[in-house]
Amino acid sequence: MASADSLHNHKLMKPKSTQEKQNRAPEKKPINQKHARHLLHQMLRIRRFEERSAEMYTKLKIRGFLHLYIGEEAVAVGVTEALTSEDAVIATYREHGHALAKGMSADAIMAEMYGKQEGCSRGRGGSMHLFDASLRFYGGNAIVGGGLPVAAGLALSDKMQQRKRLTCCFFGEGAMAEGEFHETMNLCALWQLPVLFVCENNAYAMGTALKLSESVVDLAEKAKGYGVQASSVDGMDVLAVEKAATQAAQFVRKRHQPYFLECQTYRFRAHSMFDAELYRTKTEVATWKKKDPISMFIRHLKDHKLITDKMIGELEDKVAEEVQAAVDFAEQGTLEPVEDLTRFVYSETRSS
Amino acid sequence: MIETQQEQRQITYREAMRSAIRKAMLEDERVFLMGEDVGHYGGCFAVSQGLLKEFGSERIRDTPLSESAFVGAGIGAAMGGMLPIVEIMTVNFSLLALDQILNNAATLLHMSGGQLNVPLVIRMATGGGKQLAAQHSHSLEGWYAHIPGIKVLTPATIPDALGMLGAALRDPDPVLIFENATLYNHSGIFPENDDPVDISQAKVMRQGKDLTIATYGASLHKVMEASSQLADEDIETEVIDLRVLRPLDDATLMASLRKNHRMMIVDEGWRSGSISAEISARLTEQAFYDLDAPIERLCSAEVPMPYAKHLEDAALPQVESIVKTAKSFLKQYG
């Protein structure tokens, strides 16, 4: 059995004590209370929203594929802190967390998964295809690696139009075996495109362990091979992710070049709702759960007296209210008339 | 007379495509061209020769040999407010970008509930006849016409080579333009103007009463030649240039069938599951009682394209085989 730390097969994860000292910057300089609560709030929103989504899946309200992000919340929350509202995000089929963090309403996401026309993609996308053009949230791409070239193009349009914004592209480590990863790294480095690539390394490409699919498991090294600046961070530590992503985003903005940030994380739940989890042991999962990004962050905040149980309770209540409202919204949503089936295959209005 | 002035201005299909790109780039600074060897090399088929010098490397972008990445980048750039023209060397290479074309370009608008349109134009060379063998010679445009969400254009004439690109760039959705490589040296008269042309209708290129032949791309010129030869034998054929394979212009096809009651389709694609099969099905569905004979099809032989000239010639529809097929068809059903 692989230990939690050896799964990613990477120097960053061991030894733990040294690494925690490196990335837990707030040891000396505690973060301000408001910001701490904001980060916790965001992670709790994702966690509780998804727990409820799983419940509604078992109640047959949500169908198709449902890929849960539980365990990986620190990545989406930490990275989004480094972005502005003008920055674009393109994510994978495991993107509820990124959509919530970028500002999409729980209502619109839940309604989408219910297949209702009040959903963010009018019920045409489902869990894997959340979109909000007004927030510059470009999906929801369910072809592994398929979002990377599009991210390069969004960044190219910004570069050609002399805009200052960046494009943040999330993908799993499984995507790094795809040709599109390699083509896109090369193109972005060659053309100096402002893309922040965030690799969410949860150690398994569906059920295939990293070491069974990659000849070189130090993922940052692969990006460096294309001349892309790269680093790795403990993806279970929201503060470490925020710090690393902020530095990475600054690099992209100042240097007008891509950056590759590997976030080492772990998926607590099954790959999707159809997964017997034969490829990993319960002990391994239990070991990783000790590094739960939310519990660890709460412990950290309590150590620094930045949060009380009462405050946590208040946050939980607020989140529960939001999630319940989303379920109510989705329940009350309406189905798009079948007559509209073939709408949006082609544009209904001409572009400017 | 206008006709005399036109006769003085001959232009090749290649020059017409280049002129269309140039015109689009001069008119709108959002337009740019990217693809393999479009810049320093001047384009694999010399379409973009001279454009790098005129517009610079920001707008005439040589790309790495990464079809998926640069087609995907075209999609992203289109969503980001640009109007990219992506050139893929040949239709066979476009298969390396099929993920981006089908799973993203054709799909994003619908999958996002109407939020994200992709005003992207992809141009590529297609077709056989240049002894380039089985990885550079196929005609897969009919295959692409299977996909909802994209439009498929097959310019065969000088006016369409000049005017389809501009129309495609004005379209809010992804448009694929298939340029048959044997047409680049084809020359013709510069039309009255080079404005964007209609990209929704087929066009009757020659009137006739005995038989309608529908075709597109390089086969159009073979069919026109065959029609002249048939006319010498008092067989009057009507020729339709399909021009647009998706969406198909059913009305023009049905109108001609209702007039002539006999239809033949010449298609450089493989017969099985081809655009000619689709047209035949539509004619049968929509105008069954107007048919005086089964629909005749002349397609490429179902083989990977061979190199040897005599074999390649035999694999493709030719003037001779078109004449022969039309005559035997009319002999049986005329």
Image (cartoon, rainbow, N blue to C red):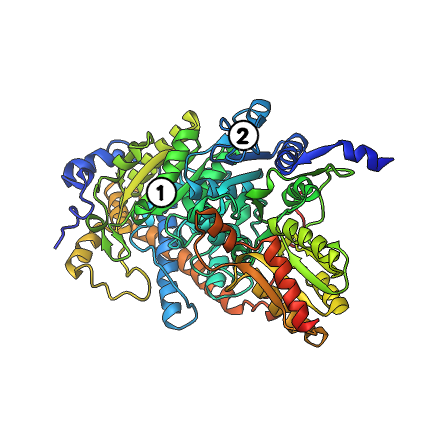
Q: Residue beneath label 1, please? A: A181
In-image side of B279 versus A151 (left or right): right
For badge 2, the amino acid type reads: Ile
Residue at screen point 13% across, 39% down: A15
Residue at screen point 74% across, 64% down: B256
* Residue closest to the far bottom: B289
The quadrant in which residue B294 appears is bottom right
Q: Residue beneath label 2, please? A: B60
CA distance separating discs 2 and 1: 24 Å
Query: Residue A229, how many percent across, how many down?
Result: 32, 30
Q: Which chain carries label 2?
A: B
In-image side of B11 versus A85 (left or right): right
Q: Mark 1 lies on which chain?
A: A
What crowding class fits label 1: few (fewer than 14 Cα within 10 Å), some (14-19), or many (20 or more)? many
What crowding class fits label 2: few (fewer than 14 Cα within 10 Å), some (14-19), or many (20 or more)? many
For the residue pair B13 and A150, the one nearer the viewer reads as B13
Query: Residue B1, how many percent across, how many down?
Result: 87, 35
Query: Residue B4, how many percent across, how many down?
Result: 83, 34
* Residue closest to the far left: A1
For the residue pair A236 and A263, the one nearer the viewer reads as A263
For the residue pair B303 and B71, the one nearer the viewer reads as B303
Residue B192 seen: yes
For badge 1, the amino acid type reads: Phe
> Could you tell me which secondary element the residue under label 2 belongs to?
strand
Residue at screen point 54% across, 30% down: B60
Q: Is residue A251 above or below residue A293?
A: above
